Image: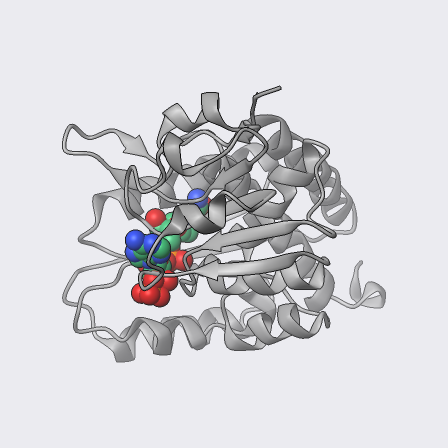
Amino acid sequence: MTLELKGKPVADQIREEVLREVEAWKARGIVPKLCTLIVEGDPASLYYAEAKGRAAEKLGIEYELHKFPATVSEGLLLDVIGRLNRDPEVHGIMLELPLPAHLHAPKIAEAILPQKDIDGLHPDNLLAAIKETTGLYPATPKACIALLTQYGHTVKGKHVVMVGRGATVGLPLMHLLLNAGATVTVCTSKTPDLSVHLKQADIAFVAVGRAGLIQPEMVHEGLILIDAGINETADGKIVGDVSADCLASSAGLSPTPGGVGTVTTAMLFRNLMDAMDLQIPVKEAR
Ligand code: NAP
């Protein structure tokens, strides 16, 4: 039976859990606080940053949006991150990407204290995810797996194809999948024919950034597809990497919008709660 794996029920469940934890923190005299840094120039990033602010408000989380002009220096951004790292009342820090070309995004992102890095993209957190040690695991890969498992599927013992090995999604997700017991095939821009691999897979995660990359003739009726790609079409629509027509030719597909992105937004707040557990020893809570 074909299934649309919508993100909302999964995100709702994560938010309910977060809300309970926020209330517990507040009862102990601590207000969770998240700060986002954004450098002006990318309207989509501003939209997402403001949407996170609205989501934080609904959860009772304090949210601070730090906006900088496109000409901001690397030094100033690093100073602000340093100040937020040292501020005990700030529990999570996010850097909206992309940054203008004169700024070295990895250097700035890596300045965020790993325990406050709720995106989970700091090298220390990536290493923790690979080695299955304590840390904040990458939010979008976690969201991809949560979306699949909440619909009753497991990757354990399955042949999983990962399309894309980008630093944000594919690479960390590949490690989470291996750790969860999947047999993983990773496809990149050099893979000659994606359909050869997709035809043999039980589950496929796609994170490339190319609209319509996966077409119905490339999949099969037993395949479950989780689409993390985000693309804007010429007429301003947001679509994934997998053609929506694949829904009829597969066993399941997550929609875009309304799939992985929806769960990722909730997962960032899940990571904020985990960040607080890492930062605040139980005895310090008032
Ligand atoms: P990225 O760094 O941009 O890398 C893209 C990957 O796709 C690379 O590994 C590249 O291969 C591969 N690729 C390019 N063309 C391909 C093709 N024809 N066939 C197979 N693989 C191909 O990726 P990212 O930062 O991880 O982002 C991936 C997508 O996820 C983007 O659309 C992004 O907007 C989206 N995203 C979504 C969320 C969410 O919440 N839903 C969050 C973050 C990102 P090579 O390695 O060979 O170059």
Task: Report if residue 37 is visible in the image.
Answer: no
- The answer to whether 258 appears left or right of 7 in the picture is left
- From the top left corner, tell me how far across and down residue 155 is, in percent: 68, 48
Picture layout, residue 185 above or below residue 109: above
Residue 12: which quarter of the image? top right
Residue displayed at 31% across by 49% down: 209
- From the top left corner, tell me how far across and down residue 228 is, in percent: 44, 44
Q: Quadrant of ligand 1?
A: bottom left
Task: Report if residue 191 is visible in the image.
Answer: yes
The image's colouring method is one colour
- On the rendered image, what quadrant is the C terminus found in? bottom right
Q: Residue furthest right?
A: 283
Picture layout, residue 95 above or below residue 248: below
Residue displayed at 79% across by 68% down: 281
Residue displayed at 14% across by 67% down: 71
Residue 120: which quarter of the image? bottom right
- The answer to whether 29 appears left or right of 73 in the picture is right
- From the top left corner, tell me how far across and down residue 114 is, in percent: 56, 72
Q: Nearer the viewer, residue 166 or 17?
A: 166
Residue displayed at 70% across by 63% down: 179
Q: How many marks?
A: 0
Q: Nearer the viewer, residue 10 or 188?
A: 188
- From the top left corner, tell me how far across and down residue 11 is, in percent: 60, 34
Picture layout, residue 268 above or below residue 190: above
- On the rendered image, what quadrant is the N terminus found in? top right
